[in-house]
Amino acid sequence: MEGMVLNQPYKQVHRPDAAAFLAQPASVRYIKPFLGRECSVKEAARELNISMSGMMYWLEKMLALELIEVTRIEERRGRPIKHYRAVAEEFFVPFALTRAGTHDEMLHEWEKPQHDALMKGIAKAREAHMAQWGILHSRQESGVLRSVFTALDGHQEVSPSGPPVLSGWITAHLTPEQAKVFQQRMMDILRDMTLLGEAGEGDPYVMHVGLAPRPEH
């Protein structure tokens, strides 16, 4: 048996090729089975729902990039089973080392699949529960046009008969201090939802929050 390798709790990536691997949604998924635990090739392939040969391909890449390592070898009749683990619990990838053109391009690449899933989930839930729904337009006191997707009778904030879905966009004028307060509130909501989700009860829901200074163009 090989000696147990002690992985790091946190690692900043310095190799450009490793950064490129971890910065791509299509490739970084293959390290997930090895984060925070030991895992064999067979177990990883089962978790990712890919073939053993496909898993071996990505395993060799991650070994070459020094992102995972062999932690122990389990002796048995026939071929021994190798167990692997990521070299760190968390990886920080500096944007400067990635191959993304701009921060904007990277954000779109990473968030588009989740955004699309949220929009599809909202549309499907509304179509299944609402006989009539559309866009409600009104003018706010500030003069801004307010447009909300809602049911025909959905003037109230949360309709008792409607599905538990929500999507809304606003432009608000805030001081830096006020923006920080709302930032913390949204982080608290995400934390609470994460804790509830870890219980594993009920149906899966997609949730997104966001806050940023509005670009001029």
Image (spheres, rainbow, N blue to C red):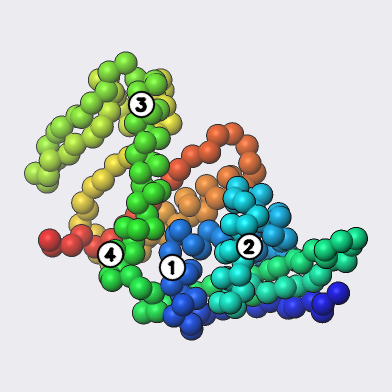
What amino acid is found at the position of numbered circle 2 in the picture? Met
**Which residue appears at 73% of the width and 78% of the height?**
6
What amino acid is found at the position of numbered circle 3 in the picture? Arg
* Mark found first going from the N terminus, 3 or 2: 2
Q: Could you tell me if the residues under marks 3 and 2 are in contact, i.e. CB atoms within 8 Å?
A: no
Query: Residue extending furthest left?
Result: 143
- Residue 168: percent from left, percent from top: 29, 42
Q: Which residue is mark 4?
A: 104
C-alpha separation, residue under disc 2 versus residue under disc 1: 20 Å
The quadrant in which residue 179 appears is bottom left
Disc number lying in front (4 or 1): 1
Q: Which residue is mark 1?
A: 23
Q: Residues within 10 Å of mark 2 (few under 14, many from 20)?
A: some
- All told, the count of numbered labels is 4
For residue 177, above or below residue 171: below
Tag 1's secondary structure? loop
- Residue 103: percent from left, percent from top: 30, 68
**Of residues 144 and 85, which is closer to you in this image?**
85
**Which residue appears at 27% of the width and 28% of the height?**
150
Q: Could you tell me if the residues under marks 3 and 4 are in contact, i.e. CB atoms within 8 Å?
A: no
Q: Which residue is mark 3?
A: 126
Q: Which residue is mark 2?
A: 56
Instruction: Identify the image quadrant of the C terminus.
Output: bottom left
**Of residues 124 and 198, which is closer to you in this image?**
124
